[in-house]
């Protein structure tokens, strides 16, 4: 009876996994097909022969190197700045005693309840008056102030670190910034890795921000470049799928090689409220 339940459970898990993997498998298969096989009936799942030329043609059709450079600019800097700022603020909320700390933390959490669409227009007006439209600044500067969700995530992890370590360091003459840098951050590797992965994937796939603030095509990242490629080569589905796969490949690699730290960081961050 137990074996039968396990078999049914694994069968259901396999069905759900295949359901979610279906778009990716179709994308990979289509990216290796010749045009005649894309909409063939019955569908061709295994291209014969596989056509790698679709990838090189897709790269040459648009300024991919420029899009990649822009994407790295608006991904790597915000990721590093978010890590630094969020960990600093989380340290203040979790390890330091100061008046009104819980009130300010509640106000910070309340900002997570505001959907981005509510603040989109006022934020755009503000950046427009600063003359920052058509620059990378609207996509870079906000990360210097951290993120409410990442601050909450890191604060939960910092609370699980024994306070005796802070007290011992204080007795040795260490001030809070030194404790934050030399004690707290080295112990918070899994949580920092989780935040870094979240931030990297979020900025890499960000479409709405660049669409609003970057109106010149020379400043487009890969997310907007993919939109331009699709509009320009609407009938070449095999190249569109090849380009889409290349755009999402870095996120897949980041998650694949760091999923252990990602899961560990998420799990440990929920130990203490």
Image (cartoon, helix red, strand yellow):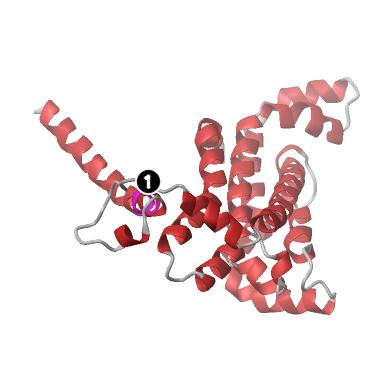
Quadrant housing the C terminus: top right
Secondary structure type for disc 1:
loop
Residue found at the very far left of the displayed protein: 1
Q: How many marks?
A: 1
The x, y position of residue 82, in whole percent, is 72, 49
Query: How many residues crowd around disc 1 within 10 Å: few (fewer than 14), some, or many (20 or more)?
Result: some
Q: Quadrant of residue 183?
A: top right
**Residue 44 on the magenta segment:** no
In this orientation, which residue lies closer to the viewer: 14 or 56? 56
Magenta span of residues: 23-27
Magenta segment, prevailing SS (helix, strand or loop): helix
Q: Is residue 44 above or below residue 1?
A: below
Q: Is residue 60 above or below residue 154?
A: below
In this orientation, which residue lies closer to the viewer: 42 or 123? 42
Q: Is residue 111 above or below residue 157?
A: below
The x, y position of residue 272, in whole percent, is 56, 36
Quadrant housing the N terminus: top left
**Residue 26 on the magenta segment:** yes
In this orientation, which residue lies closer to the viewer: 263 or 48? 48
In this orientation, which residue lies closer to the viewer: 225 or 31? 31
Name the residue at 74% across, 23% down: 165
Describe residue 4's horizontal placement relative to residue 196 as left or right.
left
Name the residue at 54% across, 36% down: 262
Residue 216 visible in the current orientation: yes
Which residue, given by chain and number where applicable, does mark 1 sit on? 50
Name the residue at 39% across, 54% down: 27
Name the residue at 27% across, 49% down: 45
Q: Is residue 213 above or below residue 257?
A: below
Residue 115 visible in the current orientation: no
The x, y position of residue 216, in whole percent, is 72, 73
Q: Quadrant of residue 212?
A: bottom right
């Amino acid at each position: 009876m137990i074996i039968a339940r396990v078999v049914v459970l694994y069968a259901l898990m396999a069905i759900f996994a295949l359901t979610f993997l279906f778009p990716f498998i179709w994308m990979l298969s289509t990216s290796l097909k010749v045009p005649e096989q894309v909409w063939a009936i019955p569908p061709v799942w295994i291209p014969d022969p596989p056509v790698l030329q679709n990838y090189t043609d897709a790269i040459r059709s648009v300024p991919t190197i420029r899009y990649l450079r822009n994407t790295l600019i608006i991904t790597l800097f915000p990721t590093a700045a978010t890590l630094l700022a969020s960990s600093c603020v989380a340290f203040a909320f979790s390890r330091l005693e100061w008046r009104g700390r819980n009130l300010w933390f509640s106000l910070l959490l309340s900002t997570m309840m505001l959907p981005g669409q509510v603040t989109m227009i006022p934020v755009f007006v503000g950046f427009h008056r600063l003359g920052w439209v058509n620059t990378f600044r609207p996509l870079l500067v906000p990360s210097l102030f951290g993120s409410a969700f990442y601050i909450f995530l890191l604060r939960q992890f910092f609370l699980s670190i024994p306070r005796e370590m802070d007290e011992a360091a204080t007795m040795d003459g260490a001030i809070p910034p030194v404790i934050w840098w030399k004690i707290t951050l080295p112990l918070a590797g899994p949580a920092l890795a989780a935040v870094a992965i979240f931030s990297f994937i979020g900025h890499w796939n960000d479409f709405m921000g660049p669409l609003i603030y970057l109106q010149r095509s020379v400043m487009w990242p890969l997310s907007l470049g993919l939109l331009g490629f699709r509009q320009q080569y609407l009938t070449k589905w095999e190249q569109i799928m090849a380009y889409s796969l290349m755009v999402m490949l870095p996120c897949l690699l980041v998650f694949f090689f760091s999923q252990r730290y990602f899961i560990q960081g998420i799990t440990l961050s929920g130990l203490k409220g």
